[in-house]
């Protein structure tokens, strides 16, 4: 029998601090369509199309995003903002205009409608800078990473939420995003995906939420019950303490999600909330469903879920877990059409589709992955080197040493630094680490992880670690080029923490710049 989960959130890990680039807003010939259109509750109440049909502009800074909003004819003029590069405090300032209401310390979508923000090209990363949606409607956010947003410490942004919605928000679709922190409240972080004060008709799909004390909430208090009609599907919730999500009143549809290492509680339905929980895969976690930390009961309808090495606490007082044999205590009618993948294939499907820079790949509803049409933004998931542009200069790994964790039979650590894409290293399982090392300190600022032929897209989440100090230099998902602040070290490690099969790393290239 597998052991109960004992993983806890780590102390705050290092974040990427890429230099701020000069921003620009450039007219583009046409909008890139969102893959397949909105799903779930975002299809109701008139639907969610974002800026479809409007002008498309390109932005490489937060200031440029704000300028694109402010340069519209009105606050409701449709616009698609294609974002590439790192958006941070250094390149995000307030811009004024009659069609916008922005702020310097966050990406502010306030009192606006008909807006799409989509990552393109080498990807979009909102670094320590949250996205705030307030008094707005018909918003699409797609193919972006938002990381390490803080509510205390420095710098702070958006109340500590990666994406936060409040005050009469309607129709939001957030899709193929990666939302992550580096710890819990004591490290200065709050929620990854929060909705409050009358936020309705929202879908979160094909996204990754990880490494945080709090996944997200619907309702800021037991009395804030004006929120709801929210769908969560095909998301990865990984290494969270709680709130996956927390529901206070309202209705939520939660299906085909993969939950791994929920340390304290998971879906917390309370204060009259109703959750329909269909065909999810819960793994290595505790108290994944119930009413917790309150005596104000919530309700759930369950069907087709798999509970793999899930532990349950004893009921009593303000603790009412649904397990160890979860049963429905309400019924929830769903007004839209949807297809359910069998829970047994959810880890594989979610591993191949969820998160930014996955090519907007989705499930076909029958446990298979389908790619979007050619007009969709984002890199092709079969590209062996997605992410930032190919590094220039000398591959420092050639002639260096290599080691790592247990390797699969017939593979070698040295295969990752021999310049031969026909050889590769694999871990003894789906997770493990491989390192490149030198006899003297070497400055590295980029690595390029190249998967072997036939295995593209297998690598899920990862960390790049300073082998000398143990500090995390970068984290993310999918193979390709990874940048981080130039660091002098003797050993750098690529640690694979999730995968959809056995990874095959053909080359672990390292570059000074």
Image (cartoon, rainbow, N blue to C red):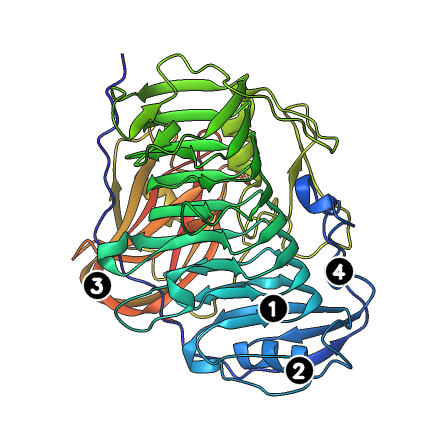
Tell me what residue is drawn at x 44 percent, y 37 percent. 271
Tell me what residue is drawn at x 60 percent, y 60 percent. 168
The crowding category of the residue bearing disc 2, from other C-alpha atoms within 10 Å (few below 14, some 14 to 19, many at least 20), is some
Identify the mark nearer the N-term, 2 or 3.
2
Check contact, mark 1 vs mark 2: CB within 8 A. no
Residue 48 x %, y %? 73, 52
- Residue 350 appears anywhere in the view: yes
Considering the numbered disc 4 on the image, is that residue within a helix, a strand or a loop? Answer: loop
Identify the mark nearer the N-term, 1 or 4.
4
Identify the mark nearer the N-term, 1 or 2.
2
- Residue 389 appears anywhere in the view: no
Along the viewing direction, whichever of 86 and 108 lies nearer the viewer: 108
Residue 321 x %, y %? 34, 23
> Which mark identifies residue 83?
1
> Which mark identifies residue 489?
3
Along the viewing direction, whichever of 372 and 128 lies nearer the viewer: 128
The crowding category of the residue bearing disc 1, from other C-alpha atoms within 10 Å (few below 14, some 14 to 19, many at least 20), is many
The crowding category of the residue bearing disc 4, from other C-alpha atoms within 10 Å (few below 14, some 14 to 19, many at least 20), is many
Q: Which residue is mark 2?
A: 70
Identify the mark nearer the N-term, 1 or 3.
1
Distance from disc 1 to disc 3, alpha carbons, whole Å, reads 32 Å
Q: Which residue is mark 4?
A: 32
Considering the numbered disc 2 on the image, is that residue within a helix, a strand or a loop? Answer: helix
Distance from disc 4 to disc 3, alpha carbons, whole Å, reads 41 Å
Q: The N terminus is located in which quarter?
A: top left
Residue 339 versus residue 436 in the image, above or below: above
Residue 279 versus residue 183 in the image, above or below: above
Locate residue 35 relative to residue 1 in the image: left or right: right
């Amino acid at each position: 029998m597998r052991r109960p989960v004992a993983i806890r959130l780590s102390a705050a890990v290092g974040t990427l601090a890429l230099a701020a680039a000069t921003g620009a807003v450039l007219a583009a010939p046409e909008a890139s369509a969102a893959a397949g259109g909105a799903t779930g509750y975002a299809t109701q109440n008139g639907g969610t199309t974002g800026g479809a049909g409007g002008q498309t502009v390109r932005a490489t800074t937060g200031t440029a995003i704000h300028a694109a909003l402010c340069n519209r004819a009105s606050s409701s003029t449709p616009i698609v903002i294609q974002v590439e590069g790192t958006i941070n405090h250094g390149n995000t300032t307030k811009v004024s205009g009659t069609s916008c209401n922005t702020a310097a310390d966050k990406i502010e979508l306030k009192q606006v409608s008909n807006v799409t923000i989509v990552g393109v090209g080498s990807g979009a990363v909102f670094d320590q800078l949250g996205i705030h949606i307030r008094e707005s409607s018909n918003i699409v956010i797609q193919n972006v990473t938002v990381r390490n947003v803080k509510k205390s410490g420095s710098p702070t942004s958006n109340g500590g939420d990666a994406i936060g919605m409040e005050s009469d928000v309607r129709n939001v679709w957030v899709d193929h995003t990666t939302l992550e922190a580096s710890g819990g409240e004591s490290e200065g972080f709050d929620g990854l995906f929060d909705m409050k004060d009358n936020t309705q008709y929202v879908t979160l799909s094909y996204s990754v939420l990880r490494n945080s004390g709090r996944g997200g909430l619907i309702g800021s208090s037991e009395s804030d019950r004006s929120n709801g009609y929210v769908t969560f599907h095909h998301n990865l919730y990984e290494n969270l303490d709680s709130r996956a999500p927390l529901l206070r009143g309202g209705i939520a549809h939660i299906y085909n999600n993969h939950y791994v290492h929920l340390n304290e509680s998971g879906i917390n339905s309370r204060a009259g909330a109703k959750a329909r929980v269909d065909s999810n895969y819960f793994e290595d976690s505790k108290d994944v469903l119930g009413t917790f930390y309150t005596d104000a009961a919530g309700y759930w309808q369950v069907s087709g879920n798999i509970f793999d090495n899930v532990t349950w606490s004893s009921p009593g007082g303000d603790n009412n877990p649904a397990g160890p044999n979860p049963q429905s205590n309400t019924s929830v009618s769903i007004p839209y059409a949807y297809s359910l993948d069998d829970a047994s294939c959810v880890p594989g499907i979610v591993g191949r589709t969820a998160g930014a820079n996955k090519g907007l790949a989705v499930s076909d509803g029958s446990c298979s992955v389908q790619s979007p049409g050619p007009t969709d933004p984002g890199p092709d998931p079969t590209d062996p080197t997605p992410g930032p542009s190919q590094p220039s200069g000398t591959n420092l790994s050639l002639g260096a040493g290599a080691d790592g964790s247990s390797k699969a039979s017939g593979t070698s650590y040295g295969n990752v630094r021999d310049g031969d894409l026909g050889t590769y290293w694999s871990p003894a399982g789906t997770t493990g680490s491989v390192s490149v090392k030198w006899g003297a300190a070497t400055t590295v600022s980029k690595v390029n992880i190249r998967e072997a032929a036939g295995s593209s897209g297998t690598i899920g989440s990862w960390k790049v670690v300073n082998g000398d100090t143990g500090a995390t230099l970068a984290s993310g998902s999918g193979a390709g080029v990874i940048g981080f602040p130039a660091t002098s070290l003797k050993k750098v490690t690529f640690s694979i923490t999730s995968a959809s099969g056995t990874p095959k790393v053909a080359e672990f290239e390292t570059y000074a710049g």
